[in-house]
Amino acid sequence: MSGRHFLQIPGPTNVPDRILRAIDSATIDHRGADFSRLGLEVLDGLRAVFKTRHPVVIYPASGTGAWEAALVNCLSPGDTVLMCETGHFAATWYNLARRYDLETIYLPGDWRHGADPLAIELQLVGDKAHKIKAVCIVHNETSTGVASRIAEIRAAMNRAGHPALLIVDTISSLASIDYRHDEWGVDVTVAGSQKGLMLPPGLSFNAVSDKALSAAKTATLPNSYWNWEAMLAANKNGLFPYTPATNLLYGLREAIAMLLDEGLDAVFARHARLAEATRRAVRGWGLDIVCLEPSEYSNSLTAVMMPDGHDADAYREVVLANFNMSLGNGLGKLAGKVFRIGHLGDFNELMLAGTLSGVEMGLELANIPHQKRGVQAALDYLAGSAGEDNDVAAA
Ligand SMILES: *Cc1c(COP(=O)(O)O)cnc(C)c1O
């Protein structure tokens, strides 16, 4: 098909040409002086993106590796971790933890709300013996388009006066939704390259607090590849204890420059605007958004419920075959029931207009009951002609 493919899944996202060109350079000696400068530059630049003064570890791995790294560095056999069932990614992380010698508490959820700060507080207050060593939260649940309120969860942990570490998965929120590692008292932030950071898959990250570093000194879960100590020692000189993904680091240097040039606040505002336009489109079609709590709407993707009796995957096939656009599938128990529109990363108004047009035409071609008002509602909002009281939800 001629023209560009529209990759509107919520990660991997569209990689900007500027980053692709940066990656397309000769691979250099990863123990030499040029590499050392590159390493120091990206390790330092990342701190601004995570909003931390503390070290950020870079792994040549997908996000799942950084999940595992966070657990095996900080915890010991028999430790209890508290997790919240927000959706498929929380469930996958929970299953990963269960494969280690860890006790798990899994607070149930309906996949339409974020992690509940009050439920977390009650668990911690009830844990007088401090058996719970870590609270693990998925910030932006990519299977549902629900963003948990991390600052409120931190406040709940503080109210409980409980010493557990706070470990947060920001794989689909970093560099698209406001996030503050230091200010929110997060101990380990887990992230990946292929979503808000606009890179291809293959890098992942742990931002690490002082408290997490001291927990790591006495933690005894076995680990080697993921070990922070060896990594941080080599990172002091911009180097790595094993071969880093050199060309992806060229891309990372470019991605950090692009994000800081635009300004993180402007990046977050752009994502918020495009997300709001998308939600107006969904309401205009008369379809339901999976997320039920407006203060938890995700600004990096929107998950949309298919009307009963219609298969979301058959619908996505129609969109791909006719308009060369990939939409995200339903995951876990939402398989076939939900499609997801990714609106994060290197993205703007006209890319969104094209995306929403493809969704609307697909609804027509696949005979999904809907109203043809979604694209117009989004365009009105983006053009600034839809005031607060002109919200299609109220119409
Ligand atoms: C994509 C994603 C993951 C999985 O990351 P991989 O890079 O596929 O290992 C985990 N958590 C969230 C929230 C994600 O969006």
Image (cartoon, grey):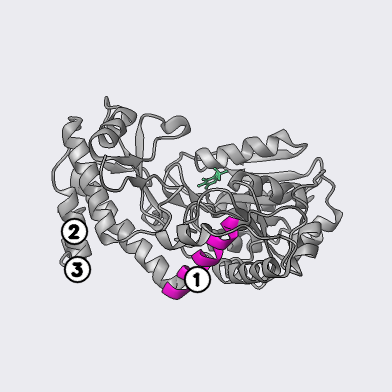
Residue at 76%, 69% in the rendered image = 236
Residue 274 as seen in the image, left or right of residue 157: left
Q: Residues within 10 Å of mark 2 (few under 14, many from 20)?
A: many
Residue 50, quarter of the rendered image? bottom right
Q: Is residue 60 visible?
A: yes
Is the residue indicated by label 3 positioned so its CB lies within 8 Å of ligand 1? Answer: no
Q: In the structure shown, which secondary structural element does the residue marked by tag 3 occupy?
A: loop
Percent position of residue 354, x then y: 23, 51
Magenta-span inclusion, residue 249: yes
Residue 379 tag number: 2
Quadrant that contains the N terminus:
top left
Whole-number angstrom distance, CA of label 3 to CA of label 1:
29 Å
Residue 386: x and y, percent? 17, 64
Q: Is residue 370 magenta?
A: no
* Image quarter for ligand 1: top right
Q: CA distance from mark 2 to mark 3?
A: 8 Å
Q: Tag 1: Cα neighbours inside 10 Å, few (<14), some, or many (≥20)?
A: some
In the rendered view, does 196 fall on the left or right side of 102?
Answer: left
Nearer to us in this view, 249 or 317: 249
Please give the name of the residue rendered at 22% of the width and 63% of the height, measured from the top-left corner: 382
Q: Earlier in the sequence, mark 1 or mark 2?
A: 1
> Three-letter amino acid code at disc 2?
Leu
Give the extent of the magenta segment: 247-262
> Where is mark 1, residue-wise?
257
